Image (cartoon, coloured by chain):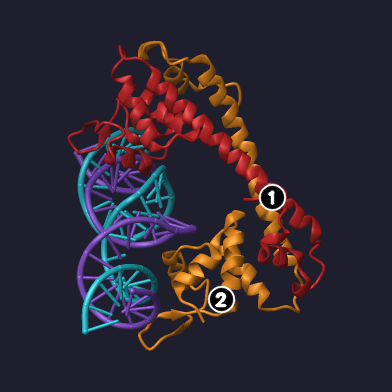
Chain colours: A red, B orange, C purple, D cyan
Amino acid sequence: MFSIGVLSKQAGVKVPTIRYYEQIGLIDPPFRTEGNQRRYGEASLERLKFIKHARDLGFSIEAIGALIELNHHPDKSCAEASQIARQQLLDTQHKIASLKRLEVELQRITDHCHGDGMVSDCYVLSALSDHGKCTSEH
Amino acid sequence: MFSIGVLSKQAGVKVPTIRYYEQIGLIDPPFRTEGNQRRYGEASLERLKFIKHARDLGFSIEAIGALIELNHHPDKSCAEASQIARQQLLDTQHKIASLKRLEVELQRITDHCHGDGMVSDCYVLSALSDHGKCTSEH
DNA sequence: TCTTGAAGCTCTAGTCACTAGAGAAATTAT
DNA sequence: ATAATTTCTCTAGTGACTAGAGCTTCAAGA
């Protein structure tokens, strides 16, 4: 049995975040000492690590909740879990593609401006004013 | 002079967002009709398009505020504008690099799971439980 | 055993950039 | 004149936390 501070360090999740996860029902309320302090066991640590890892990979709290719910039914098919992960992969790929388009535009804009002119001639400012100068959609 | 609805359509920014921008001081309060409705001119449209474009490129409201402020001093050096844009480019590149690492892990996780097994054997769930299975840091 | 200082508790409010909804008033079209 | 649409203000909600106030409990050293 360990305190919330120890759990926090073990899992790499901040103390207020753990309390927040409990508040929204993502983790179960733990035992309490007589003085009302939280005490956790190994199972809590494992779950919190799971959550942390999934958050780091970009899963939403909602998706993580669904995965945990699935985990409670070991005899069910894992099709749903697979689907959630695949969707997360697609979302990530879309974000990458979108950011790459922005990168191209930003590179073009900054390449044109060396920061040594006057504001009135600044390509950064004029490019932002005029979407027509962009080479692709975004 | 046109209404907030027309401005909204012209700039591609939703009506409540325009009011929000006014509230936080990103755009100036416009004229009002006798009946208290907002009426805008061309200058407002240009500024709103500028904001929209910069937002689409990922600039924060704060950065946009700084760029607008610069725009009010045409005789100053554009070094600061250039710096803001370069920082935005760096941020974007970091985000892309980070998302690419996540993509690799997600791809690996989903490749291992065809969704036809049982939850108890699911690679998605076990991979999320065990960071040690990851091939790179994230 | 006492004391001190760290760690814990609850609760509220703030972050960012909006978005949604209620209920009333103004404007536009028929 | 009436009906339909738009606009107004205001409050509250979103996601995923983070920060702070003011209080209590715990663990370690003297």
* Residue A53 at x, y percent in the picture: 47, 29
Q: Quadrant of residue A128?
A: bottom right
Which residue is depicted at the point 38% across and 31% down? A64
Please tell me which residue lies in front, D30 or C14: C14
Residue at screen point 69% across, 58% down: B85
Furthest residue toward bottom: B34
**Image position of A77 with respect to B68: above or below:** above
Task: Please state which amino acid type lies under the numbered disc 2.
Answer: Ser
Instruction: Give residue B52's mark.
Output: none
Say which quarter of the image contains residue A29: top left
Q: Position of residue A70 (x, y in %)?
A: 32, 22
Between the C-alphas of marks 1 and 2, the distance is 25 Å
Query: Image height check: is A136 above or below B97?
Result: below
User: Which residue lies most toward the left here?
Assistant: A34
Q: Residues within 10 Å of mark 2 (few under 14, many from 20)?
A: some
Position of residue D10 relative to residue A90, above or below, is below
- Spot occupied by residue A88 in the image (x, y as percentages of width and height): 48, 31
- Find numbered disc 2 in the image and state the secondary structure of the residue it sits on: helix
Pick whichever, A88 or C7, lies toward us: A88
Q: Which residue is mark 1?
A: A136
Figure disc tally: 2
Where disc 1 sits, the SS reads loop
- Taking the spot 61% from the left edge, 25% from the top edge, the residue there is B136
Which residue is painted at 58% across and 34% down in the image?
A93
Q: Is residue B24 visible?
A: no
In which quarter of the view is residue A81 placed?
top left
Instruction: Work out whether residue A90 can be spotted.
Output: yes
Q: Residue B138 at what x, y percent from top left?
A: 57, 32
Q: Which residue is mark 2?
A: B44
Q: Amino acid at mark 1?
A: Ser
Mark 1: few/some/many CA within 10 Å (<14, 14-19, 20+)? few
- The chain identifier of the residue carrying mark 2 reads B
